[in-house]
Image (cartoon, helix red, strand yellow):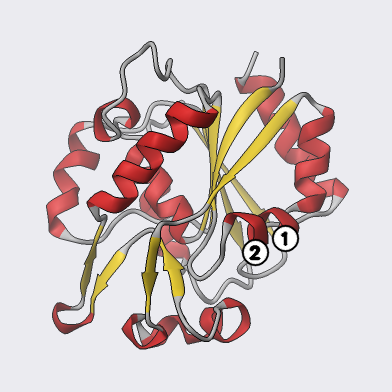
Amino acid sequence: MAKKILVLHGLAQSGDYFKSKTKGLRNELEKQGYELLYATAPNKYQPADIPDSLGDVLTSEAAESHVLAWIEDDLQHDTYRLPETTIDYLHDFVLEYGPFDGVLGFSQGAGVAGYLMTDFNGLLRLTAEQQPPLRFFMTFSGFRFKPEQYQAQYDRNPISVPSLHVQGELDTITDPFKVEQLYNSCTPESRTFLKHSGGHYVPNSRGFAKKVIEWLQKVDK
């Protein structure tokens, strides 16, 4: 039986879109016996409701009519929150397609995944029978939630699941210090940092996939 990985896409993407964008890495993971299941964010927002700093993302990937997102932005107060619609959707997704062995997230999806990894079952209201303990977590251009209301959750529940934190050296969307904040939210013995030479995307080269698989073989025995 294939080992299942829950995959959370970035802002303005969809599960199908991100699946096509990660074909190279996905194919290599499938050769190792993993099945990647791509969720699609349930929230639709107008492009005008998205922060200006993410304009480059929207120009290249967003539909003209709406933007799919896991997080709800509050531009008036310069903050954001994880809405119940996302929690409910992921709860149902795990029940329908899980249980999962690991989680992979990119950009906003990695930020959400990182927050959930502080207490995956508790935050998604899942029992141990519905979702046994996860064995690994991979974050590409991920970040720690910034709003104050979420800080206690990270501080009280350091992420102890083996985690791989990937940062693009040319990434201008997720700043290095944001990646580092999520990295530092994990226990020292469980975390691994990996750079690639590109920008804000998940690399698909065989050489990079080999590094990911070597890490997986160490932590997912």
Residue placed under numbered mark 1 in the picture: 21
Residue 125 % position (x, y): 26, 29
Residue 30 % position (x, y): 79, 33
Frontmost residue, 57 versus 153: 57
Residue at 19% across / 61% down in the picture? 147
Frontmost residue, 115 versus 36: 36
Frontmost residue, 148 versus 85: 85
For numbered disc 1, what is the local secondary structure?
helix
User: Which quadrant does the N terminus fall into?
Assistant: top right
User: Which quadrant does the C terminus fall into?
Assistant: top right
Residue 201 circle label: 2
User: Quick check: 100 above or below 17?
Assistant: above
For numbered disc 2, what is the local secondary structure?
loop
**Quadrant in which residue 179 is drawn:** bottom left
Residue 143 % position (x, y): 40, 56
**Quadrant in which residue 184 is drawn:** top left
